[in-house]
Structures are given as structure tokens and as C-alpha cells.
Amino acid sequence: MTKHHPSNDCLMEHAAGSLPVAQAACVSAHLSYCERCRRTDSQLKTVGGALLERLDPIPVSEALLDTVLARLEDPVPLTYTGQTAAAELPSLLQRLINGDFSQLVWKRITRSLSISYLSTGDTNYEFALYRIAAGGRIPEHTHGGGEMTLVLEGGFSDGRDSYHPGDFIYRDAEDKHAPVALDGEDCICLAVLDAPLRFTGWKHRWLNPFQQLHAG
Amino acid sequence: MVENKSDSETDSGRVWSVPTGRRTDEWSECLVQIGNNSDRAAFTRFFRHFAPLIKAFALAGSSLSAAHADELVQEVMLKVWQKAGGFNPEKAAASTWIYTIARNCRTDMFRRLQKFDTPLAADDLNIELEGEEPFTVLHTRRGSDRIRDLMGQLPPDQAQILAKVYMEGKSHSEAAAELDLPLGTVKSRVRLAIQKLQVQMDRQ
């Protein structure tokens, strides 16, 4: 059971298709864990359908119907459909990763934190996996912008609460946090950022010039 | 289109108070026929009803040209034909189902036109409700009938915001800028609309 969910606004923008692809992928990965949000998403899509029914129709030509009828037997392109993941990784992540965590290239940031950057093509958002060693701590930091986090493995705590696989957390630019991975296993999270990490403590501030947004 | 008529209460009132009229059940049956029997006559009926709505959706507040709008109609309708076999009338109304297809095709088309290269198609990000349990199915179906009925009773200012967000794909802040309203007003109208539609959301 996931305890932390995207905001209502965020779920609505997702259902309306207006979230940037990197954020949409993160919300969608949460949906694959969370039945409650899937249900909300389904109702929000119903709202979309009801609005569609109420648009003022704009006539289309008979020629367009003929074109479509003539193409009905065209070979169907292979498609992939989003599946819900019971215990494993959401399938869209599996596709982006191209396998499992062991095949990723991890960049070591501090003793307990490594990051692996994935590509969504979204040039405004960094889409990355964070691995925090069991019991390890990410030094206190902020971001220049918003940060979406989805726990994939293990868990972490930030002093306010603890978070487990499927939990979705949004923090805005001002939010200062220093997550600590729970003991027992490494914590792997998906993080979507629109500005790089900024360490706030004197011990780690020197690292800041090396932190860049790896969007794309 | 309703979004240009915010100054004329009567006009937008008229547009939004049109009763649901035909239940989309007719269209759900139509989809089932298309899916089960590759029924071209059913498909033609479905096309005549929905293609003009998809075209309106394509042109709603977007920069798509008329030619692109027609291309979108084509893509959506071909998908309808190809995917109708997977349509389950117990889970969703026909309009919800086709809305999802249209939304995804439009997103992909925008990205294509902007030369935005991503390994993720909009379809990849669409997670369907599993709802195998009878309770969930019944619940979903009732919920969706109710939402469609209640939509007709929304005050025009709330319906207008929802149309901006859904039909035009605007974020809440973009909608606020366009309507020259404070962001807080947009958010509270959205919240009120969602409450009136009885969408089950977390109280925040």
C-alpha cells in the first residue's frame, strides 16, 4: 500500500496529458503501484471523455472517411501498453533502463549516494535513479526547482515520514531535505528535477559547482 | 467554442447545459461490434459521430493546422479500428476510451511536430485500471455515468476551466494567464468542478 501520492492537480494534469514527459513518466510509474490513484486517473479520464462529447463538432470531409476506410487493413504497428507492476519495476522504467539495475552506469556523488541518468528526451527535466546505500544519508540539500521522487526499492526517511516502494513525493524549490535510507537494503528512487541538486551544508557545498542538470 | 465566450453568460450557458442526449451506450455497443466482427458499417457510424469531435479536439486552443487536425482524426480512427477488440464496456464509456486515444495521439503529434525526440510514446504512459473485481467494475461504470450526467450541470465558469485544461491541454497556470485570472481562482474552480462531478480524490 502506497501512502504518499501525487497532488490532485498533478493527477489532473496527467489525465489531461499536459505534464512534461519526464514528470508524466514518474506519475505513471506511481500509478502502476497505486490502485487508488489508478482509480482517480480513470475517473479523470472520464471527465476528459465527457468534455470531448460536449465539444462543438467540426465537420470532416467524406474524403477523409474514405481514406480511413481504405487504410483499415494496413498492417498494425507493434505497440506496447503500459502494464501495472505488482512487485517488479514499472515496465516503462524497465524499458528506459533496458534491463535491470545491474546494467546501469552509476556515478558516485558522495560515499552513500550514486546517480544513474536516464534519457526521456525531455530537455527541461533530469530523469535519474538515485541509489542511497542502506542507512546512508544524502547531505542536506535543496533544488533550484521542483523535485518529484518515487521510491522503487528499499525506503528512506526524511524526519517527517518514511517512504516505501510506490510512494510519490513532491518537494518544491525551497524545501531543504536530507533523506536517510532505511537500514537493511539500498534505497533506489526515481527523481525528476528541473534544477540541479544544491547541497546546503558547509561540508558538501564545495560539490555544488560540479552538480549539473543532466536533462535530455 | 466556449472558451471565447466567457463574457457572454447566456451563450456559454447554452453550450454547457445541453443535456447528455444520446447515452454513449450506443457507442459502446458500436465499439464492441467493431471489435468482435470488424464491422465496417458500425465503424462508419462511429466515425461520423466522433470524427467531428476529434477534429474539434485537435483544433481546440492549439497550433495544429487544419491538415494536421485531419491527420490526427485519421490516426485516432485507425487506432479505434485496431484497438476496438480490447475495449471493455464494463470498464469505460466509449467517450472515455476514445478520449484517451485522442489525447495520446495529440501529445505524440505535438512532440513529433516540435521534433521532440523521446523513447516514450504517450501510450506507454497510460496506465489502465485493472479492476478485475466485480465491485471495482460496477463502481467504475457507475462513477463514469454519474460524471457524464453531472458535467451538464456545471456552472459555465467551472466548465470553461476544465475545457481549457483538458481540451486545450493547458496547465493551470497557462489557463490562469489566458483567462486573466489569479492562479488561486483557477485552482479553486477546478477543485469545485471536480467536487461537483464527484470524482473521488484525496482531500488536500
Image (cartoon, coloured by chain):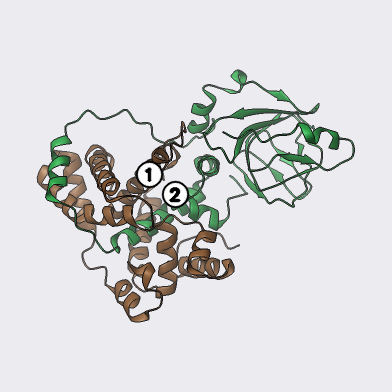
Quadrant where the N terminus of chain B sits is bottom left
Give the x, y percent position of residue A40. Answer: 47, 54
Find disc 2 in the rendering and name its residue.
Answer: A17
Q: Which chain is green?
A: A
Which chain does the numbered disc 1 sit on?
A: B
For image coordinates 49% across by 66% down, the residue present is B190
Residue A104 or A151: which is nearer the viewer?
Answer: A104
Which chain does the numbered disc 2 sit on?
A: A
Quadrant where the C terminus of chain B sits is bottom right
> What crowding class fits label 1: few (fewer than 14 Cα within 10 Å), some (14-19), or many (20 or more)?
many
B59 sits left or right of A185 in the view: left
Give the x, y percent position of residue B157. Answer: 43, 73
Find disc 1 in the rendering and name its residue.
Answer: B104
Q: CA distance from mark 2 to mark 1?
A: 7 Å
> Helix, strand or loop at disc 1?
helix
Residues under numbered marks 2 and 1 in contact, where contact means CB atoms less than 8 Å apart = yes
Q: Which quadrant of the view contains residue A103?
A: top right
Is A214 placed above or below B192 here?
A: above
Residue B111 visible: yes
For image coordinates 50% across by 56% down, the residue present is B171
> What crowding class fits label 2: few (fewer than 14 Cα within 10 Å), some (14-19), or many (20 or more)?
many
Residue A145 or B191: which is nearer the viewer?
Answer: A145
B121 sits left or right of A102 in the view: left
Amino acid identity at mark 2: Gly
Marks 2 and 1 on same chain = no
Name the residue furthest top: A103
Give the x, y percent position of residue B77. Answer: 23, 44
Amino acid identity at mark 1: Asn
Name the residue furthest left: B41
